[in-house]
């Protein structure tokens, strides 16, 4: 599980292989005990993503949210 990106706008790390999202705490550590699959995130979480962060995971957002497009 090493292929991941930090999504600073929502204080999370996204792992490409598993499509899992983990929060990052105030000390910049990934909280591995609080996992959410990308398909289970709510639309508010997606709206809070910066444009830059959306681009990082755009392919997977389109996979799990069929009508998704970057705005």
Image: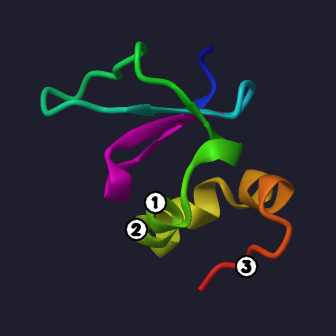
Q: How is the image coloured?
A: rainbow
Foreground of the two, 44 or 22: 44
Neighbor class of circle 3 (other Cα within 10 Å; few <14, some 14-19, many 20+) is few
**Please, what secondary structure does the residue beneath circle 3 have?**
loop
Q: Residue at x 13, y 26 (%)?
A: 27
What quarter of the picture does the C terminus occupy?
bottom right
Q: Are marks 2 and 3 in contact (CB under 8 Å)?
A: no
Foreground of the two, 35 or 14: 35
User: Residue 24: image x %, image y %?
Assistant: 30, 32
Mark 2 lies on residue = 48
- First reached walking from the N terminus: tag 1 or tag 3: 1
Q: Residue at x 41, y 13 (%)?
A: 33
Mark 3 lies on residue = 69
Which stretch is magenta? 5-15
The stretch drawn in magenta includes residue 13: yes
User: Residue 45: image x %, image y %?
Assistant: 46, 59
Judge whether 25 appears above or below 47 on screen.
above
Mark 1 lies on residue = 45
Neighbor class of circle 2 (other Cα within 10 Å; few <14, some 14-19, many 20+) is few
Q: Is residue 53 left or right of residue 17?
A: left
What quarter of the picture does the N terminus occupy?
top right
Whole-angstrom CA distance, mark 2 to mark 3, is: 14 Å
Whole-angstrom CA distance, mark 1 to mark 3, is: 15 Å
The stretch drawn in magenta includes residue 67: no
User: Residue 56: image x %, image y %?
Assistant: 60, 56
Residue extending farthest left: 27
């Amino acid at each position: 599980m090493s292929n991941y990106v930090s999504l600073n706008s929502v204080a999370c790390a996204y792992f490409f292989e598993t499509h899992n999202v983990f929060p990052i705490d105030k000390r910049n550590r990934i909280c591995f005990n609080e996992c959410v699959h990308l398909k289970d995130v709510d639309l508010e979480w997606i709206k809070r993503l910066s444009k830059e962060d959306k681009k990082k995971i755009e392919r997977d957002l389109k996979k799990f949210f069929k009508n998704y497009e970057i705005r």
